[in-house]
Amino acid sequence: MDRNQLMKWIKAPTKMAHKYSLNAVYFCTGCGVIEVPPTITSRWDAERFGVVPTATARQANLFLITGYVSVKTLRAIIRTYEQMPEPKYTVGFGSCTINGGMYWDSYNTINQLDKYIPIDGYIAGCMPRPEAIFVAVTHLWTLIDKDMADGYKRYRKNYAAYRANQEMILGEMEWPPIFQTEVATAITEREG
Amino acid sequence: MRILWFVLSPLMALAVGLFFLGLSRRFMARIQWRVGPPLYQPLIDILRQFTQKSVSHGPLFDLGVVLSLASSFIVVLFMPLGGTAPLSSSGGFLVVLYLMLLGPLGIALSGGEAANPNVSIGISRKLILALGYEVPFLMIVLALMTYYGTISIGEIVAAQRESASAIASFPLVFSGIAYLLILPAMLGVRPFEVVGAAQEISSGPAAEYGGPYLALATIQHGLTMFIGISLFVNLLWGGASNPVVFFLKMLVVFAFGFWVNAAFPRLRVEQAVRYLWRWPTLIAFVGLILVATIGR
Ligand code: SF4
């Protein structure tokens, strides 16, 4: 952890601020949510690393999806993700978000979350322990440092594909595309 | 010297307000047997929020936050922070009473533009809660103004410096106790955290704020805390002769407020109003009657 290194703060203040102020929306879909309370309370105390839960998507920059995603919650997940201000990071929690896990052949859950919203990293396990969340956070720090946590840019760039995937599973969606696809590509090219 | 204070006192309010925000998180963490974030965590948060892109819901949404922040800064100018207040002679206490309402009003205006049901519930709760604590607060204020025969905060502070501080003198001790009882409600901390209840109404009026808006709202929150505490120190604890003593006195009041925050669960809004209109109002009323009959 390089939170106390003043030089890094002077060199890249935004990056450091994004690293050490991860306000998380916990999307409590599956069983994995049971690991979140010990993570944020006295036992493991995620707040000392600046990871705190927030109540609304607008205030957050970390999106933690804790477990299997049913088709119905996918709609809410997409809306929540699109409401978060950029830059934003997403972490899938548990094997269910990676490939469906033990709900692989369920009739009402999706298998790969990455098809519908961009994921910056996964925590493997069924279910992962709170320690794994901390490992994930340190990995996320590394990714932010190396500019590799760029899910939100990928979303903008490949919005047409993501939207097509979303519509395939949800049918008609009640909100219009948030990016004009050509516009989104242009913005991404400009900002890199 | 007064010109200097025009710059210094908002800066001091900003610094101390942010420090209190950080300290409150640390304080709560220690009470809950945790390590807690570093003291400068609010600074990191604000830096992060300022660099995030956010949506606006309309011109009023932008202006409301600015209005509430500006009004808080102006209130600070009326506060003698262990010295002379920059705006002490021009209006005094009554202006502060009006301006203090502008803070929540600005947030309400801006939140109303967002048309989020959680925001509306939060705002209505804020107004109900304000109705709850304004009644005893006005009685306390009235008692103080009658007792000292002035409407200027600076003169009240000066009068207390000559004799004992208000909370230690006989009829005003009731007002002091009543003020201590409503202080958590004015600061919006836990037993009265009905407005920004994160688990219930998604942090209420701040629900639609993201990015820079949230940063400004956070600063405003820090300033509100600063104003609530410094008003208590000035009115009832005799202010201070220099900013350092003033700050130390504020720390004591702050510790009291957050000890209450850590020790009590949240009340429902009607329970909060019932409490506020019963004990603090009763005690403040007794204080007012005593001041009116006995006098100085
Ligand atoms: S990965 Fe395991 S623990 Fe997590 S939601 Fe799926 S089945 Fe439950």
Image: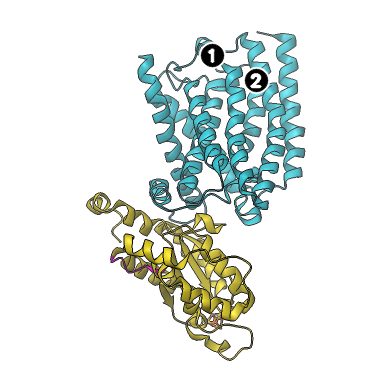
Magenta stretch bounds: A146-152
Q: Quadrant of residue B167?
A: top right
Q: CA distance from mark 2 to mark 1?
A: 15 Å
Image side of residue A29 versus residue A16, left or right: right
SS assignment at label 1: helix
Q: Say if B291 sits above or below A52 in the image.
A: above
Mark 1 belongs to which subunit? B
Residue B219 in picture, x, y percent from top left: 47, 40
Residue labelled with disc 1: B160
- Residue nearest the viewer, comparing B217 with A40: B217
Q: Quadrant of residue B283?
A: top right
Q: Where's ligand 1: which quadrant?
A: bottom right
Q: Earlier in the sequence, mark 2 or mark 1?
A: 2
State which chain disc 2 sits on: B
Residue toward you, A37 or B208? B208
Q: Is residue A80 magenta?
A: no
Name the residue beneath numbered marker 2.
Answer: B141
- Of the chain colours in the picture, the one used for chain A is yellow
- Among the chains pictured, the one given cyan colouring is B
Residue B140 visible within the image: yes
State the quadrant of the N terminus of chain B.
Answer: top left
Question: B114 left or right of B83?
Answer: right
* Residue A151, horizontal then vertical, whole percent: 40, 69
